[in-house]
Amino acid sequence: MKINKEQGFTVSHLLLTMALISILAATAIGDLKSGRTPVHDAALQTELFLKLARARAMSQTKFITVHPAGAWTLVAESSDSCSGTPENIADLSLTIKRPAQIAYLESSVCFNPRGMASENVSFTINGDGEHCREIEIALGGGTKMTGEGCQ
């Protein structure tokens, strides 16, 4: 019996290695994107918080209102209608990191059980005077972050 002493990598080994490297590279690129500016990070957190509140309204079939409770905090409250008596949702709040802050404290949005917003609303996140982001909420409940329209 003849034994082949030359060994190498099979195609499946190479494909598996390439797949692992691409997964690690995608994870590293995602981590690099998150550290742009404190204002951008706060606006991204705010946008994700609004999406979470909308998802909660749909999953619990309740009306959920999101509004600022100060320059650095967003809170959510549930009720049977947008004008009903609100109950604070203890596990659904967001505190953004300084120097970013919420610019207009009178902004609020109410999501109905179908995930639709009560009106077109925008939340503005300001920072060090140079950076600003605006999160727009459409009537359908979708969100979009822009850097335009900020003063």
Image (cartoon, rainbow, N blue to C red):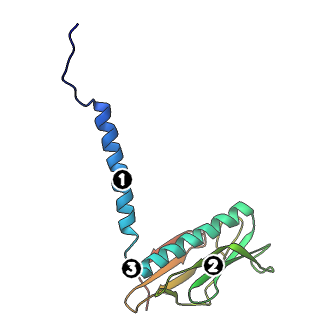
Location of residue 52 (image quadrant): bottom right
Mark 3 highlights which residue?
37
Image point (51%, 85%), residue name: 124
Contact between marks 1 and 3 (CB within 8 A): the answer is no
| Residue 148 picture quarter | bottom left
Front tag of 1 and 2? 1
How far apart marks 2 and 3 lie (CA) works out to: 29 Å
Q: Which label sits on residue 63?
A: none
Q: Amino acid at mark 1?
A: Leu
Mark 2 or mark 3, which is nearer to you? Answer: 3
What residue is at 71 percent from the left and 74 percent from the top? 90
The type of residue carrying mark 2 is Glu
User: What residue is rendered at 77% in x and 79% in y?
Assistant: 86
Residue 49 sits in quarter: bottom right
Q: Secondary structure at mark 1?
A: helix
Q: From the image, tell me which residue sits under label 1.
A: 24
SS state under label 3: loop
